[in-house]
Amino acid sequence: MAAMRRSEYAGPVALRAMQALAVRSFPATGYRHIGDLTWNWCLSLDREAECPTAIWTHGDRTLAWGWLESPDGLMLQVDPGHPELADEVLDWAERVAAGPLSAEVAETEPHLAAALERRGYARAADGPFMVCLDRPLIDLPDAPRLPDDYTMRAQRDHADVAGRAAAHRAAFGSTRVTAERHARMRETWPYRPELDLVVVSPAGDVVAYCQGWYDEANGTGEFEPVGTHPGHRRLGLARSVCTAVLHAFADAGGRRAVVYSRGDAAYPLPKRLYESMGFRAYTRTHTYTGPAGA
């Protein structure tokens, strides 16, 4: 009989193995969609030394993984049928990390919360958190009409890819999404170009977008990310492009759509948009911080 094996990597090299556990666990937890992992893989490109990973397997079956974001962030997933592996993931992460760790887990992952609390990690009483929302892919509204001379489409060429990356940087004030990273992500499973739609302004610039990811095994699509350039907000662009992606999920055979949004009062607008589109919360995250010396 095959023994349990831990494999360590510089960066998320074994992405498909991690996604295999994400697919299998999603019906129970509703967290860590396969699209999340590909999106985070994109953000880690050319930063492999800052993003060590480890994966626990039994034969060809992934049972747990950990993914560090230096200096102190930890993403982890553990098969609910093997909760004892949570301690092994945390042992590895605490050994590799430079200092106390911070980990975000969903309320639907009680085996992870229990392991963190047992080891002395403190759950934040307030501050930012994510709320997980979903809606069925039935009775979908028509996509609202765009303002005059704005158009919506899938990305067609390098100029669109570069424009999509630039729109993300403007929307989130981030420099991590470059045209090169976005182009490489577009070549990574489970990317589908018909689920990654952009809105183009009258001047020809990409000014809003909704990137969709589809988990065929679970019939579940996810938005990650959604953004609008600050100079083109309050025009209904995000609602229109998100609604179009919902229809694309349904056309692919999907039954459910999910999106993760900030749930705290400091950043309320995206959640209000999704709720107005028929999404409802089904779980939320909590952040746990490790004790000094962990």
Image: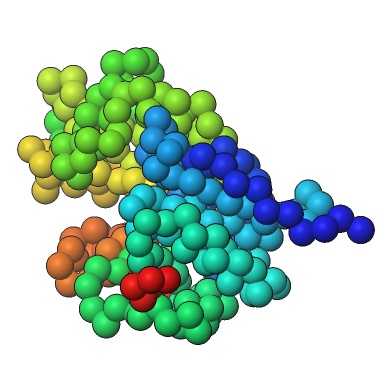
Q: Quadrant of residue 143?
A: top left
Query: Total marks drawn?
Result: 0
At 73% from the left and 54% from the top, the residue drawn is: 5
Task: Tell whether 3 sits left or right of 158.
Answer: right
Look at the image and tell me whether residue 101 can be seen.
yes
Q: In which quarter of the image is the C terminus?
A: bottom left
Front residue (pair 58, 199): 58
In the image, is 205 to the left or to the right of 100? left
Q: Where, quadrant-wise, is the N terminus in this rendering?
A: bottom right
- Residue 160 placement: quadrant: top left
* Residue 45, horizontal then vertical, whole percent: 41, 33
Please, which residue is most extreme toward the front here? Answer: 293
Q: Is residue 258 above or below residue 18?
A: below
119 shown above or below 265: below
Q: Where is residue 207 in the image (x, y as percent from the top left)?
A: 19, 33
Relative to 36, residue 118 above or below: below
Left of 130 or right of it: where is 195? right
Residue with the most extreme right position: 1
Residue 131: x %, y % from top left? 35, 68
From the top left corner, tell me how far across and down residue 205 is, in percent.
18, 23
Residue 32 visible from this viewpoint: no
Which residue sits at x=14%, y=31%? 148
Q: Which residue is drawn at 23% across and 78% down?
A: 126
Query: For the point 51% across and 26% down, which residue is it?
Result: 187
* Coloration mode: rainbow
Work out whether residue 272 or residue 48 is closer to the camera in this orientation and state it.
48
Residue 161: image quadrant is top left
